[in-house]
Image (cartoon, rainbow, N blue to C red):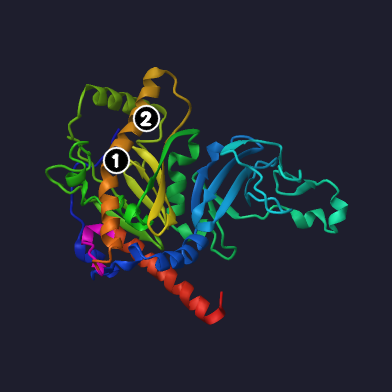
Amino acid sequence: MNIATSTFRRVDQSALDWLGTDPIPAKPYHDPDFFELERAAVFMRSWIVIGHVCELPDAGSFIRRDLEFANASLLIVRDRKQEIRAFYNVCTHRGTQLVREAQGQRSAFTCPYHMWTFGTDGALLSAPDFEAFHVKKQDCSLPTVRVEVIAGLIFVNFDEKAEPLRQELGDFFPQLEATPLGQATTFLEYSYEIESNWKLCYDNFQENYHLRFIHPRTGYAGVGAENPFGYPIDYHFNGPHRGQKIWYNLQAPSKGVVQQTAAERALDILGKKGLLGQPAGDQYFALFPNSFILGNPLQNFLHVVYPISAGRSRGVIRLFWVGEPENASEAFSREFYLTMLREVHGEDINVIEGGYRGLASGALKHIHFQTQEVLCRHLHNMVMEKVGEYQRRIAENGQ
């Protein structure tokens, strides 16, 4: 099973100069006023990953997602017709939240305050003494949010005028659909909160320049003698989205008997029925604004960074699988790789938070990206472009 690249060829740096080479202003990485601009210009107008279809296996299955940047709680439901819908988690009577559970299954949703009851399609089914309200039931349906499913991932968008995600993704759409994410039936997950601006956190996972300095203890397989910084062997850009082809060191040594046993078992399992070893097994897809998908010989996961404030973010990392573990050995292998992810990620936390504290002090007016940090620069460019468009629209139309 050939799922890794053994020969490193450095990307021609001049081919990336079109993205710019100047220092980047530091203010967008810590300033509360800029955060409010990008919250409105980017997050309220972009497609945001909030779940996976395997969380909604049957009619009536639901998940609740609270998104601080939108000051909203969402109710994602599979209705009786098996369609996935997204609603605000808010009763249309007086605004009480319908659901407090993180997930579950119901045939209808009843407000605990006055017993207004809604169907899985969002329609108001009943309300005590409803005739006294002098309105029609069809005018009291749950407010909706746009939703699309790509490669099994559920996206929402608060902007009714936004381009459909399938069109926005362009060539990335068939590539993502070709990955096995849509086949996933289960996942392991952990989440974290971090004292950092969302872009600073996200950028840490877009560049490999730091690998040999921050991760020598965990022995990340993305570095080696011929590629000591773990640079990718290719970059690609598609509108606001970007990606890279990861290089792996096939000769990276195992760190111990337990790790070696788990790795061998995992690769055996994955070769038969898992999500790795696929054509996109060494590809990194960064989906604007805040998520990325990475598959490689040891990890296949989704990472989403949600902004909470200018200086605080929440990350959600998921490792996807097909089917439940068949035995203890397979269960151990899955848990091992999630544990490994947490261990590697734990080495990043302090430097990310330290970077935010340094920038938030106002000591720096600019930061610097080298050529191989090109994905970080591209994200900055796209954010600035969206913010600029939003400011022009406000100036011209007032909205």
Instruction: Report the disc number at residue 248.
Output: none
Residue at the limit of the structure toward the right, as seen here: 131
Residue for point 44% across, 23% down: 325
- Crowd around label 1: few <14 · some 14–19 · many ≥20 (10 Å): few
Q: In the rendering, at what x and y percent does residue 355 appear?
A: 26, 55
Which residue is under mark 2?
270
Q: What element carries label 1?
A: helix
Q: Residue at x 30, y 62 (%)?
A: 360
Whether residue 372 appears in magenta in the rendering, the answer is yes
Disc 1 residue type (three-letter): Gly
Q: Nearer the viewer, mark 2 or mark 1?
A: 1
Location of residue 307 by image quarter:
bottom left
Point out the stretch of residues depicted in magenta: 365-374
Q: Is mark 2 on a helix, strand or loop?
A: helix
Among the two numbered marks 2 and 1 on one chain, the one whose residue lies closer to the N terminus: 2
Q: Position of residue 316 (x, y in %)?
A: 42, 44
Would residue 156 appear left or right of 262 to someone viewing this image? right
> Is 299 a magenta residue?
no
Residue under label 1: 346
The answer to whether one can see residue 280 in this image is no
